[in-house]
Amino acid sequence: MSTTHHRLEYGLQTSGHYNGLLTAAKWAETRGLVAFAVPDHYLMALNPEAEVPALDGLVQLAGLARETTSIELSVVVSPITFRHPSVLYKTGVTIADMSGGRFKLGVGTGWLDREHEIYGIPYPDMKERFARLEDALAYIAAALRNEAHDGPFYSLEEFTHIPAPEGGLPLLVGGLGKRKTPRLAGTYAAEFNCYPGPLDEFAAKIQVARDSASDAGRSPDDMMISTSGAVLAAETQEEFDELFAAEATAAGLTPEELESHYAKRNTPRGTYEQVRQQLGDFADLGVTRFYLQTGNADLDAIGDLLDAIMI
């Protein structure tokens, strides 16, 4: 029996009602994907009028922890604006306990203004959100070592926390920042998750993360580099053009507007051959995991797409 070795490992990232997530997570596990991720937003669409279900991602992951057996579970990512780091830490430890050590805690600054406005969640400026994120990461790292932490926003007494998280509590840091986000990932995270963007910018962010890991006394090779994205692909250019036009119409955008949106994020798109090349470019930069983001409930279609684009 031959084994196919891929240059990238693959995860699935999606959102929605719990039963849909459970079906998708079990499918991903059966298929052999390495991770299942959910976002953490109280508003799941840029347009607040869009009727898109938004549920608490960490609560959903706790449910999935009991109903899956082997796949890694992660939140990509939880805004520091939503929860005190003690709550993030204890929730993470709880999901690690419920999953048998399969949980990775993703934390970010938060970016969606409107969800904070609607729910009345304090939303400091970006500079303070980054400062709070750094303080929270240091707090969680201290908690994992049973050490004290005295930061500008959060403090923790030296204390033996029981239980210690099964499998540890690996941290994921994700976001679009060019310097602060990769610096924090390199300092604290087991995984740096970053939208690719232009390849030269992506490479620079990865280098900042690796350098920061070295500066923190860590081996850069111990930090996973991952990226995420929707993928729009078809067998032929003609089929892709039709798919792209339909996607733009569904989004209420012109094809030019959609292309601008995708280009900024370097979203893999085109023929299957072109997408494999784009994923190969990511792998050449040191990316080892790709999370396919989808709102598509057609798991057979997702499977066919993965079969066509996997490298």
Image: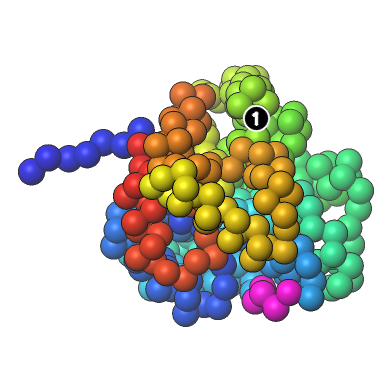
Above or below 121: residue 102: above
Residue 43 magenta-drawn? no
Tell me where residue 222 appears, x and y as whole percent: 47, 30
Quarter of the picture containing the N terminus is top left
Figure colour scheme: rainbow
Q: Could you tell me which secondary element the residue under label 1 belongs to?
A: loop
Q: Nearer the viewer, residue 75 or 86?
A: 75
Location of residue 174 with respect to 89 vertically, above or below: above
The residue at the point 46 percent across, 71 percent down is: 297
Give me the residue at 79% from left, 71% from top: 48
Rendered image quadrant of residue 206:
top right
Which residue shows up at 53% across the image and 55% down it? 242
| Circle 1 residue | 198
Along the line of sight, which residue is nearer the eye, 100 or 209? 209
43 or 198: which is nearer to us?
198
The part of the chain drawn in magenta is 50-54
Could you tell me if residue 153 is visible in this image?
Answer: yes
Q: Give the amino acid at mark 1.
A: Pro
Residue 117 in picture, x, y percent from top left: 89, 67
Where in the figure is residue 102, as x and y percent of width and height? 42, 56
Q: Position of residue 221 (x, y in %)?
A: 47, 25
Is residue 216 visible to us here? no
For residue 247, side relative to residue 71 (left or right): right
The answer to if 51 sits in the magenta stretch is yes
Helix, strand or loop for the magenta stretch, by majority: loop
Quarter of the picture holding the C terminus: top left
Residue furthest to the front in view is 238
Q: Is residue 209 above or below residue 57?
A: above
Residue at 52 percent across and 60 percent down: it is 294
Q: Residue furthest right?
A: 125
